């Protein structure tokens, strides 16, 4: 049920999840309690009345750039990585529906025996029906991380923001796990993020967000209810704005 007394800060968002976010404490693959926690958070966020699309990575199974380092041709390695994102998309679809919320996994790499192929029209249809849309398969093209398709999907779906889930609570001047003196930014512009080479998102993704005036909210996915907290304007996060 939608709570009209507590409307979300943004009406339509794209949540960018890394594959590693689904590993939890496991060294590889999916960690069932973590998958359930994130699925519950996504379902709860949709209950606010927000339309939720998710772009998920595949690094918990296979990262294209690491495969290329092991001698696999980069284009082929990226194709394997795209398949890993579909695996995660199907897992998220099932986990969200187990929370009582309808979800649809759509793949940019056509595989109709497993899930619906991605199209803007299909995604908008499912969002209008209140379903959580999981956009898997990246862009369907090699040489892109899943940061870029997150912003591409946000632009084509006219999303109000990209919610970038990470392992830290925002954007820092340096890696806070390695540099105790690192300072967290409360707000940045896209231009500042690009000029300072802040590694929280690909430069191409920042540039595309800047061109389309899409804010990027960077927050930690480690806490229960983190996505809903961002939608409600709570919690610690860095806002990267036009």
Image: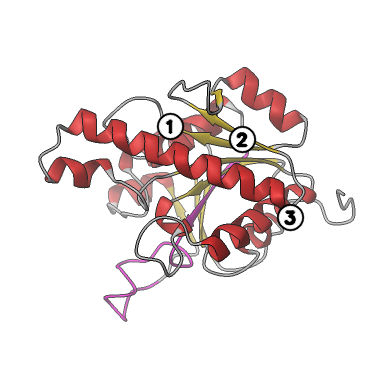
Residue at 27 percent of width and 52 percent of height: 197
Q: Is residue 17 above or below residue 226?
A: above
Q: Are marks 3 and 2 in contact (CB under 8 Å)?
A: no
Crowding around mark 1 (Cα neighbors within 10 Å: few <14, some 14 to 19, many 20+) is many
Crowding around mark 2 (Cα neighbors within 10 Å: few <14, some 14 to 19, many 20+) is many
- Report helix, strand or loop for mark 1: loop
Foreground of the two, 55 or 96? 96
Q: Is residue 30 left or right of residue 157?
A: left
Label placed on residue 44: 3
Quickly name the residue at label 1.
Answer: 137
- Report helix, strand or loop for mark 2: loop
Label placed on residue 12: none
Residue at 61 percent of width and 29 percent of height: 158
Residue at 28 percent of width and 28 percent of height: 142
Quickly name the residue at label 2.
Answer: 159
Q: Is residue 89 left or right of residue 140?
A: right
Mark found first going from the N terminus, 2 or 1: 1
Q: Which residues are magenta?
A: 160-183
178 inside magenta stretch: yes
Q: Are marks 3 and 1 in contact (CB under 8 Å)?
A: no
Which numbered mark, 2 or 1, is in the foreground of this view?
A: 1
Q: Is residue 136 above or below residue 193?
A: above
């Amino acid at each position: 049920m939608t709570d009209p007394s507590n409307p979300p800060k943004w009406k339509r968002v794209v949540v960018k999840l890394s594959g590693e976010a689904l590993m939890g404490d496991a060294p590889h693959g999916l960690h069932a309690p973590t998958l359930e926690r994130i699925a519950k958070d996504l379902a709860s966020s949709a209950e606010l009345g927000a339309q939720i699309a998710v772009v998920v990575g595949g690094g918990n199974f296979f990262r294209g750039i690491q495969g290329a380092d092991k001698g696999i041709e980069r284009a082929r390695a990226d194709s394997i990585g795209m398949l890993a994102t579909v695996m995660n998309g199907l897992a998220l679809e099932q986990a969200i529906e187990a929370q009582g919320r309808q979800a649809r996994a759509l793949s940019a790499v056509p595989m109709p025996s497993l899930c619906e192929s991605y199209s803007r029209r299909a995604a908008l249809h499912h969002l209008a029906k209140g379903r959580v849309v999981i956009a898997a398969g990246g862009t369907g093209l090699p040489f892109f991380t899943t940061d870029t398709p997150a912003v591409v999907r946000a632009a084509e779906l006219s999303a109000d923001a990209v919610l970038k889930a990470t392992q830290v609570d925002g954007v820092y001047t340096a890696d806070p796990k390695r540099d105790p003196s690192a300072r967290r930014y409360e707000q940045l512009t896209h231009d500042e993020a690009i000029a300072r080479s802040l590694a929280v998102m690909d430069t191409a993704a920042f540039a595309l967000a800047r061109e389309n005036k899409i804010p990027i909210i960077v927050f930690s996915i480690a806490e229960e209810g983190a996505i809903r907290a961002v939608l409600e304007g709570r919690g610690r996060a860095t806002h990267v704005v036009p």
